[in-house]
Amino acid sequence: GETSTLNCAKLLTNMASLHKRAERYEQAIALWERASTIYERIEGKASAGYLNCMTEISSAYNRTGNLEQATNVNERLQHTLQQSNTNDERWAISLLNQAQSYTNEGNYAQAIVLQQQALSTFVVRNDSLKMCHALKGLSNTYHLQGNTQIAIDTCLKAPCGCLVANGN
């Protein structure tokens, strides 16, 4: 039944995570795609299982340098999440993944827009650790853009304890 099928999807995602740790991204992507199909069929596109698979797929494509595929997955993910809840943590994470793709392509202006949107979501959610992650990405993008002072100012916006929590 559905329970055993969902258990299968969980096993697929666990196996994919093992492949990811071993940096075998192509195998991980294939497993996450199989799992996402199951989650979509049983629970729908707004389910945590489906969204987490899509986020992992996007991240894996980024790591393999397949930025076009990463962008494609992120756009689909963002569309799904915008229809449900724009203050959703997964939506903001997908924005950060997309921003990383843009940064890798040298499209810093677009990356900054997405990083700021993600940061706004984390501020609304009062999620200090994720705010730090977004601020770190923003600061890095400003630095790559040649805006060193803005990069430094962005770092200074981090919540207290952020640098300790991130081990920096």
Image (cartoon, grey):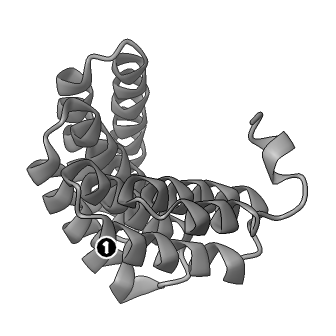
Q: Nearer the viewer, residue 15 or 3?
A: 15
Point 27% across, 44% down: residue: 57
Res. 136 image quadrant: bottom right
In the image, is residue 39 above or below residue 111?
Answer: above
Q: Which residue is mark 1?
A: 109
Left or right: residue 47 versus residue 104 is right
**Spot occupied by residue 46 in the image (x, y as percentages of width and height):** 38, 71
Callout 1, which amino acid? Ala
Q: Quadrant of the C terminus?
A: top right
Point 37% across, 12% down: residue: 22
In the image, is residue 64 above or below residue 109?
Answer: above
Point 34% across, 87% down: residue: 83
**Spot occupied by residue 41 in the image (x, y as percentages of width and height):** 23, 60
Left or right: residue 27 versus residue 6 is left
Left or right: residue 158 versus residue 60 is right
Left or right: residue 74 versus residue 139 is left
**Spot occupied by residue 121 in the image (x, y as percentages of width and height):** 59, 79
Q: Nearer the viewer, residue 70 or 79?
A: 70
